[in-house]
Amino acid sequence: MDVSPRLLVVRRGQEEESFHRGRAVVATATGETVVAIGDAEAPVFPRSAIKPMQAIPLVASGAAETFGLTDAEIALACGSHVGSPLHVATAQSILKKIDLSCDALGCGVHWPLDSGQTRALAARGEEPTVLHNNCSGKHSGFLAVGAVRGLDIAGYTKASHPIMREVTNAISLLTGATLDEAQACVDGCAIPAFSMPLVSVATGFARLGTGEGLSPVFASSVARIRSAIVKNPVMLSGEGRFDTCVTAGCSGEVFVKSGAEGVIAASIPALGYGLVVKIDDGAHRAATAVMAELLLYVLQKHSLVSTKAREMLKGYACFQLKNWNGTNVGSAQPILFDGP
Amino acid sequence: MDVSPRLLVVRRGQEEESFHRGRAVVATATGETVVAIGDAEAPVFPRSAIKPMQAIPLVASGAAETFGLTDAEIALACGSHVGSPLHVATAQSILKKIDLSCDALGCGVHWPLDSGQTRALAARGEEPTVLHNNCSGKHSGFLAVGAVRGLDIAGYTKASHPIMREVTNAISLLTGATLDEAQACVDGCAIPAFSMPLVSVATGFARLGTGEGLSPVFASSVARIRSAIVKNPVMLSGEGRFDTCVTAGCSGEVFVKSGAEGVIAASIPALGYGLVVKIDDGAHRAATAVMAELLLYVLQKHSLVSTKAREMLKGYACFQLKNWNGTNVGSAQPILFDGP
């Protein structure tokens, strides 16, 4: 098998302590590869990075319109939120509009992704509910599709359920990947998880950014999703988190979505580019640094980055490691184009 | 540079999702290499894995004896604890015996390593103190060395301070590595961090297990440390954690200590072996699985493992990945000796 290149080096003082290998692709809506670092064709599970694709049926089915979902609610359906009171309330609001309780959600319960939110919840003497699950917005969106279609929602997380078939079909149309329902694996939130070539994820994010190659309904649906996300970046993740800060900090030029196991995808609509990073070992710290460096490279090349956005991205790409006393003890640096 | 072999594969369903590369060594007290997977000579920062070596001056200086430290307190000085009330009280007890308050500790403050302990602390409306720092026992031990030696403890975390010189000297004598104080990096808890060949860490753990090649004082000190650890494995880390469970589960045949960035070291005194694993990317999930597999291999070869210990180690080596609903969604499997 191909050995992926080293993409991030972590140093203690000036000495190398750890490093991460991985792959990255920038592609257009037609699947043309603009940048390929490592094997662009080898498979990846995009996981939650493709939530904006999984939210397409919510808009395309007319559910968002029928139930009067706000942009914030649509953005939450595209997000992996950190379980703040705002996120929980937004998921609840979607469910209220479709006349369901949170008992209908099949994503399971976990403590908030954000440690500060977890401590705040514990300090209030509360336990997490299914609404704190980072996927509660996405699942509420699925149930809205079921509601507008008049479907029985029992077993809605199964690959063979009509809601999931609609979701899988959207992913397939966006990415161009053939997805075999019978071969579906299971994601963290119980819905089908499919692997696909890395370049397909980038292609899908190019299409999310432009609508190119999509039907009129899908093209207008991705436009609504894009607009909802860039107006509500906090719904993608949460205050201070990578997806939220990069999407907010790039002033609508970019939107970014992370998934588990070291995957992050992004779209630059003005260029018609989709971007994706997969770290071999699944490390999020490396995926964020590498995606920031890749965005910097592409945006600078096309003069699409403000001074402020450039500094923000640089801060994610190269960063100091501090110890508990706040002393600098090392650094992390991406090596996308000229590394050993 | 050499590419490290793949040591752990993480699958979703039957498909590969992520994998970890790394290196592992089993060596004797004379530095003879029994097993070498990947480059045994390339450097590693052993980080907290070598806390049992850093605790040697606490015993060798006579401080443990003078101040009447218990086995539990000595074990805590070798541990990276999870900040439970028991751990906090034990660190406090060391400080009380040397007539210092926790203000003397220079390791910094962080929320407990264990998320359950963090939530419990938050639920009590408390904030962490320096005693919750996973290194508070080790630092209390350092201060005990200063107390018995009558040293000024100001700046005790600096490489040039007499306490740290004594600690660095102990590491050097155990590992055989030449450690240049002027080249010291800084660890998470502010003390010096040195890199050394991976095999040196294994050699040091072989010596920790047998005392072979050490002065009489050091040999009796490591015997006391070994005894303290195997009687108090919970002080190494905490309930349910790898170091504690493996040390407890192997009935005194093994002790194990993890460090940051994917390092774990272990000792099998009866065989005179030291073991060490370094995962290239720093992932603890891979280090635990690979160390469990390596221990299984060595212990089984020498018929030193009970049925119960074997099952425990197998559970750490190969494990199911479950989602928030408790459904099996994948697995992780080490591939130490025959992997692709």
Image: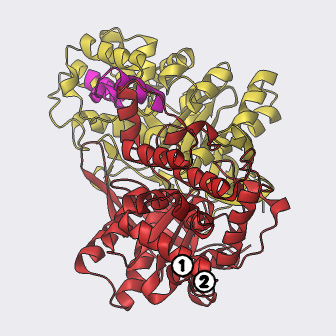
Chain colours: A red, B yellow
Residue at image location 38% in from the left, 84% down from the top = A299
Q: Which residue is mark 2?
A: A216
Residue at image location 69% in from the left, 59% down from the top = A149
Q: Does residue A113 show up?
A: no
User: Would residue B318 be found to the left or right of residue A287 on screen?
Assistant: right
**Amino acid type assigned to the residue bearing label 1 in the image:** Ser
Residue at image location 26% in from the left, 17% down from the top = B95
Q: Are marks 2 and 1 in contact (CB under 8 Å)?
A: yes
Instruction: Please identify the quarter of the rendering in which residue A30 is found.
Output: bottom right
Above or below: residue B121 compared with residue A257 = above
Give residue A274's position: percent from left, percent from top. 53, 80
Quadrant assignment for the N terminus of chain A: bottom right
Instruction: Please identify the quarter of the rendering in which residue A233 is found.
Output: bottom left
**Amino acid type assigned to the residue bearing label 2 in the image:** Pro
- SS class, disc 2: helix
Q: Respond whether the residues carrying marks 2 and 1 are from the same subunit.
A: yes
Give residue B184's position: percent from left, percent from top. 31, 51
Magenta range is: B115-144
Q: Which chain's residue wears label 2?
A: A
Residue B259 shows which numbered tag? Answer: none
The answer to whether residue B116 is magenta is yes
- SS class, disc 1: helix
Q: Which residue is mark 1?
A: A220
Give residue A145's position: percent from left, percent from top. 64, 58
Give residue B91's position: percent from left, percent from top. 34, 19
